[in-house]
Amino acid sequence: MIEILTDGGRPTVKGFRLYILPIVLFLATPVILHKEFSGEIILKPYIFKVGNFDIRWYAILIVTGFVLGARLVYNRAPKYGIATKDIDLLLISGYIAGLIGARLYYVIFNWNYYARNPFEIIAFWHGGLAIHGAWIGALLTGIIFARIKKIPFLKLADLCVVAFPLAQSIGRWGNFFNYEAFGTPTDLPWKLFIPKGARPIAYRDFSYFHPTFLYESAWDLFVFIYLYQLEKKEPPQGVLFFRYLLLYSIGRLFIESLRTDSLYFGNFRVAQLISLFFIAIAIYFELSIKKRLYSEG
């Protein structure tokens, strides 16, 4: 976290350089990728393709996020008193369960399409993964793992959750290459060109949209930096986990309001309903932790 210190009577800022990274990401991306954002260059969803076989950016970015996140968990496991040999099973099973959960969640809320195209259900590399579904899969894996290994769940959650937003920040770029998860039309300087074939029918006559993938990538990077810095202060068990739920959900609540591809439950956006639920859960448990510490102190 940014700390205001004094140096000879003058205030200085510690950690400021880390916190400007999300701002740099947000501001620099449309400049560096000007031709891609303006539509001069139309992106392809794959790195290379031979016949019907291709390697897609979406899959590569998800794997990259997982690998970097896993490395972060490995490096910090000894600090939490958790053997690195136990981390192997946790990460592999959690990744698989998260991927399955993310896909099933998306398929369930788009069942009309997948009922007509059943072979597309397993084609996650074409896009269509929901982070809340990944949470459910990973959460269930963590609960089961903690019970088997007799490790306090919140300790395990604190260890892993710092890596989540880092992986999410990287994975969100898969949406960029797939021309998906963008927002409503805009004329803002950082507007993103979307090819006509990828636009919703209601917006076919518009060319430029909010790059909501970039909004969330920058926000996730901020959340990662915040949690990484907060961890150094050794907060009470569970604080990192619930702070992640709070911060990510706040960002998602607002970003989701711009998206054109939201999953709906009736007239409500599912992601916003879940975000509100997790915000309430996070606030409740953080207050409970503070109350317990106050009574013990």
Image (cartoon, rainbow, N blue to C red):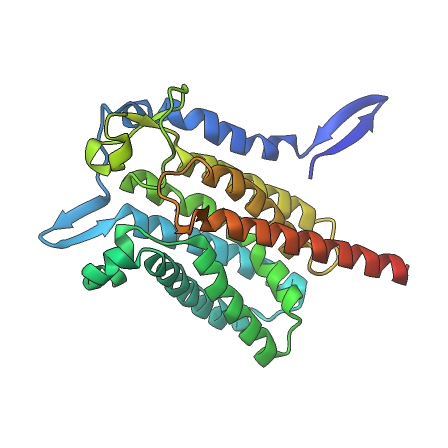
Position of 60 with respect to 264 (left or right) is left
Residue drawn at (37%, 52%) of the image:
62
State which quadrant residue 66 falls in. Answer: bottom left
Q: Residue furthest front?
A: 266
Residue 89 appears in the figure: yes
Decide: is 107 above or below 247: below
Q: In this view of the protein, which residue sits in the foreground, 249 or 15?
A: 249
Q: Position of residue 12 (x, y in %)?
A: 75, 26
Name the residue at the bottom extreme: 148
The quadrant where residue 242 appears: bottom right
Instruction: Tell me, yes or no, if residue 123 can be seen here.
Output: no
Residue 215, position as x, y percentages in the image: 46, 35
Q: Is residue 115 above or below residue 173?
A: below
Residue found at the very far left of the displayed protein:
51
**Residue 79: image location, x then y, percent:** 66, 61
Q: Position of residue 139 (x, y in %)?
A: 53, 65
Quarter in which the C terminus is drawn = bottom right
Image point 83% across, 57% down: which residue?
Answer: 291
Comparing 200 with 119, the one in front is 200
**Between 86 and 155, the one nearer to me in the picture:** 155
User: In the picture, residue 147 is in which quadrant?
Assistant: bottom right
Residue 252 in the figure: left or right of residue 95 = right
Image height of 160 relative to 275, above or below:
below
The quarter of the picture where the N terminus appears is top right
Circle count = 0
Front-most of residues 212 and 149: 212
Residue shown at 89%/61% (left/top)?
295
Q: Residue at 43%, 35% (x, y): give it.
A: 258
